[in-house]
Amino acid sequence: MPAISGMLGTASVGGASLEVDSWSVDMSCTVHRYATTATTDDQTNALAGRQVHTCHVEGVMAGGSLPATPGTTISVALGVTGGVALGGQGVVSKVSVPPVDISEGAPVRWAIDFEVDGILS
């Protein structure tokens, strides 16, 4: 079976398109543990709660300002080879600029963390 690779990463904030070159997604849900009269031997059952999706996208800064600020809305389309694609929008929770290399004049990077409205699909 061939390996899959990342092939898509776009984001937009306030109508401005951002070039994404790295992304990650965390999908989780709250799991509620409970016991009933039907459970024995100190066992508990599990019940899945609501899903929560968070994303992290990165790219190279273009223009003279940060690509977003906390509290703004971001839309994304993310994908890999093999037909797996995720998209949706959310609210920016954190904007970071990693260490800037001034000795080499390397491109300035940015990173955005956001909470997805609903779930990615």
Image (cartoon, grey):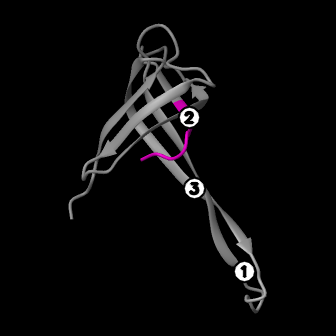
- Of residue 81 and residue 87, the one placed in the foreground of this image is 87
Disc 2: CA contacts within 10 A as few (<14), some (14-19) or many (>=20):
many
| Foreground: disc 2 or disc 1 | 1
As measured in the structure, the alpha-carbon distance from the residue carrying label 1 to the one carrying label 3 is: 20 Å
Check disc 2 and report the residue beneath it: 113
Q: Are marks 2 and 1 in contact (CB under 8 Å)?
A: no
Badge count: 3
> Tag 1 or tag 2, which sits nearer the N-term?
1
Q: Are marks 1 and 3 in contact (CB under 8 Å)?
A: no
> Tag 2 or tag 3, which sits nearer the N-term?
3
Residue that lies at the very extreme toward the top in this rendered image? 64
- The secondary element bearing badge 1 is classed as loop
Q: Position of residue 4 (x, y in %)?
A: 27, 53
Badge 2 amino acid: Asp
Snapshot quadrant of residue 45: bottom right
Badge 1 amino acid: Thr
**Image: magenta residue range:** 112-121
Residue that lies at the very extreme toward the bottom in this rendered image? 41
- The secondary element bearing badge 2 is classed as strand
Q: Is residue 32 above or below residue 72?
A: below
Check disc 3 and report the residue beneath it: 28
> Tag 3 or tag 1, which sits nearer the N-term?
3
| Foreground: disc 3 or disc 2 | 3
